[in-house]
Amino acid sequence: MNDQIRDIAARMGIGRPEAVYGPADGVTPWDRELHLFEHGVVVRLADGRIQGFPWGSVTVLKDVIDPFRSVYSLNDGVAPAVVIDGFDRAEEWGPAIHGAVLRAHLPQARAALQAGRPVAFGEITVTQQALLAPTGALPWHRISEVRVENGAAVAKVGEQWQPLTTTHVRDIPNFLVLFSLIEELRNGAPAPRSRVGWVVGGVASVLVAALVAGGIVGVKRLVRTGVSQSLAASDQTAAPTVSPSDTPSTPSDTYSPTAEPDPSPSEEPFDPSVLDDEDTDETPITPDALLAGSFTTRKGVRYTLKGTRSDDCPAWFQEGHVRQVLRKARCRGMISGIYASANSTKRNRIMVVVRVIPFKDADTAETAFNRLQAGSRDWGFMCPMKGPGSQLCANGRGSWSSAYIWGWTQNSHRYVISSLALYENLANGRSTKPWLSDASKAVLGAAGPMVHHDGTD
């Protein structure tokens, strides 16, 4: 950290430094820097300017909805607005900015409402009695749910969904704060402190997962036989159906490939019962320990790991019933990975996402598993930053939400493992089912604590 950045932070009184991010791969100039502090942010911009913002006075707009690319606009009403884009590890600093702004502004908004003052978010205003929008005033008791459809906020009033405004949520300042207030007021009471983390994760899922074209894809559970399978079919026009290659090999395009795990076998025979409780389970909660570098399905198709990520639980891209169940089960983290069928083209390539979620103990995992079977909402998807499948999380047409999706969920000791599979070309004919089911079921054996413990069970 250079002296100028340190001086600006000290002058603004934004506390101690917490993290610094450089430019993402391929982004210049190389001296661009994003510094997160305890109570604000300082940015060295592409043109050399250095500008800082305290969290308590900044409004944030998320301009591009994409889990792996974040473009934020920060404005404090005094200095020129700053666009933050092209910094490394956007999956870390993006949610961090949202969370910091929420923690700073939500108490201010609550205090204003308690004093009888309205709180405005662009065209939408919150009062103690109602939500005021361009489409009309909605008393809180009439609103049963607010979500995002095709980029715009909509409310469920009675049995009908109606838009709040034609303005996309990416253009509504501090939408996370607005959404949090809506959740509190329609439920009749402020969210407790412990719920703030859930609100950040839940709304981030709205901003990221639900704003891609086609909106949210519901997942319906079909059967439960200890391992459960699930299906989500799009309402959109069917794409051509294809079958993946039976003779795949390692693809040339990869993103952050994870090496094959390095098992650490014990000198004594491994007792899998230690995996039933977090106090005895020594499995590292890391991608290397919980995700295999590749796997082969019963149909003989080989899949390779294209990218991984670690998230809080519930994750910021999850919502609805999944989020509620995971939050109630008090999970604290999850590991996700995305695999692609090797040596395939876009015409027949399958992408498979798997998530490994540790719980306190095996009973908690089983309870969560059983509740998820009862009709969970969307788990959300994950895309590599580049290469095969990277376009599936882009905003606009051609996103993953228009594809036919098949997935499985299972519980193993204190872990729940969930998968989703789809064709990269968004095929959604029912003839895709055997191949998607084959891939999404096989990945369950390539994920979980036994990856670290040499597959012994």
Image (cartoon, grey):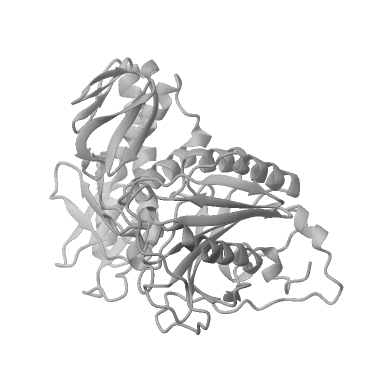
Q: Residue at x 56, y 51 (%)?
A: 230
- Which quarter of the image is occupied by the C terminus? bottom right
Q: Nearer the viewer, residue 217 or 11?
A: 217
Q: Nearer the viewer, residue 125 or 403?
A: 403
Q: Nearer the viewer, residue 224 or 78?
A: 224
- Which quarter of the image is occupied by the N terminus? bottom left
Q: Residue at x 62, y 76 (%)?
A: 261
- Residue 132, given in percent of the width and then of the height, sits at 24, 22
Q: Residue at x 23, y 29 (%)?
A: 124
Residue 336 in sight in this render: no
Q: Residue at x 58, y 43 (%)?
A: 326
In the rendered view, tell whether residue 282 sits above or below residue 341: above
Occupied quadrant, residue 71: bottom left
Left or right of residue 21: residue 166: left
Left or right of residue 379: residue 408: right
- Residue 26, given in percent of the width and then of the height, sits at 27, 76
Count every numbered label the image shows and give the total: 0
In the rendered view, tell whether residue 243 sits above or below residue 217: below
- Residue 429, given in percent of the width and then of the height, sits at 42, 58
